[in-house]
Amino acid sequence: MNTVTHPISVGPETFDADVLAASRRQLVLVDFWAAWCGPCKAIAPLLDEIARERADRVLVAKVDVDAHPQLAARFGIRSIPSLLVFRDGEAVDSMTGVRPKSAILQRLDAAAAAPAAA
């Protein structure tokens, strides 16, 4: 498994492989964002840090909702920034709005510790 130390950009062509398939090996945190969104810009450095610090356990991916509205619709994204946590090919948690890094890490840890789906 390659360790990725920065957020990756994903779109409809790559989402299933880069997020869903990858989430069978490690947690994937997906940031739904847009360039014009101030709160999205505020949370971006935190996600960069998480990508670096947790590269062995968490892959951070970004979806630009303006470029890929079909992905936002597929996952019911109505507000940005929205963070979805994927595990075993499924979204297992979501957060909307700017959150402290500690809160994001706590949710990731909880998702990692939860029993696997049957």
Image (cartoon, grey):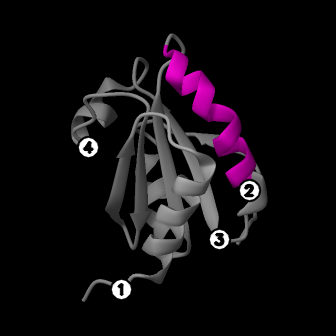
Marks 3 & 4, CB-CB < 8 Å contact: no
Give above or below for 74 relative to 27: above
- The quarter of the rendered structure image containing the N terminus is bottom right
Q: Residue at x 49, y 35 (%)?
A: 98
Q: Residue at x 38, y 47 (%)?
A: 95
Q: Which tag is nearer the camera, tag 3 or tag 2? A: 3
Secondary element under disc 4, as helix, strand or loop, is loop
Cα–Cα gap, marks 3 and 4:
23 Å
Cα–Cα gap, marks 3 and 2:
10 Å
Give above or below for 67 relative to 78: above
**Disc sitting over residue 116 in the figure:** 1
Residue where numbered disc 4 is placed:
75
Graded by Cα atoms within 10 Å as few (under 14), some (14 to 19) or many (20 or more), the crowding at tag 4 reads few
Whether residue 18 is visible, yes or no, is no
Graded by Cα atoms within 10 Å as few (under 14), some (14 to 19) or many (20 or more), the crowding at tag 3 reads some
Residue range corresponding to the magenta coloring:
37-51
Cα–Cα gap, marks 3 and 1:
16 Å
Residue where numbered disc 2 is placed:
4
**Disc sitting over residue 88 in the figure:** none
Give the residue type at disc 3: Arg
Secondary element under disc 1, as helix, strand or loop, is loop
> Taking 105 as reference, is 48 left or right?
right
Q: Earlier in the sequence, mark 2 or mark 4?
A: 2
Q: Earlier in the sequence, mark 3 or mark 2?
A: 2
Graded by Cα atoms within 10 Å as few (under 14), some (14 to 19) or many (20 or more), the crowding at tag 2 reads some
Q: Earlier in the sequence, mark 1 or mark 4?
A: 4
Q: Residue at x 36, y 67 (%)?
A: 89
Cα–Cα gap, marks 1 and 2:
24 Å
Residue where numbered disc 3 is placed:
57
Magenta segment main secondary structure: helix
